[in-house]
Image: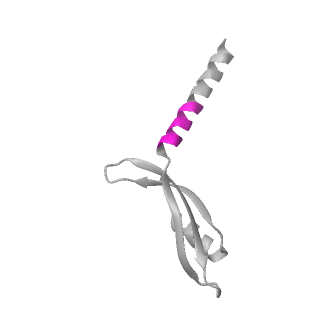
Amino acid sequence: MVDRAYRESVNKHTPYEIEHRLLMPDGRIKIIQENGETFFAKDGTPQRSIGTAQDISSLRQMESQMQLLVSLSNIAAKQS
């Protein structure tokens, strides 16, 4: 998935952004947001790629908790 996003960005000469999971050796799963861009020579050959990878696991966990609270709040409101 990540490799495909990178290759497609190189082929299309566009930046890429992808969110994916990493399974850590201790069994934890991290959610990563990765952004990158490739720079090309005048003849179109790729010269270098740069980018960032950020662990957004905590952000996604907070979003899930907020969605759960909203759902529970909606259920409670319907039962009132």
**Residue at the extreme left:** 26
In this view of the protein, which residue sits in the foreground, 29 or 12?
12
Q: Quadrant of the C terminus?
A: top right
Q: Is residue 55 above or below residue 43?
A: above
- Which residue is located at x 61 percent, y 84 percent? 41
In this view of the protein, which residue sits in the foreground, 42 or 56?
42
- Which residue is located at x 37 percent, y 47 percent? 28
- Which residue is located at x 57 percent, y 26 percent? 69
Residue 13 falls in image quadrant: bottom right
Q: Is residue 31 above or below residue 13?
A: above
Residue 78 falls in image quadrant: top right
Residue 26 is covered by the magenta coloring: no
Q: Is residue 49 above or below residue 79?
A: below
- Image position of 57 (left or right of 76): left
**Residue at the extreme bottom:** 43
The magenta segment: 58-67
Residue 61 is covered by the magenta coloring: yes
Instruction: List x then y, in percent, for residue 43.
Output: 64, 88
Number of disc labels? 0
Main SS of the magenta segment?
helix
- Which residue is located at x 42 percent, y 48 percent? 29
Instruction: List x then y, in percent, for residue 23.
Output: 40, 53
Instruction: List x then y, in percent, for residue 34.
Output: 53, 58
- Image position of 24 (left or right of 69): left
Q: How is the image coloured?
A: one colour
In this view of the protein, which residue sits in the foreground, 78 or 41?
41
Q: Is residue 25 above or below residue 47?
A: above
- Image position of 24 (left or right of 73): left
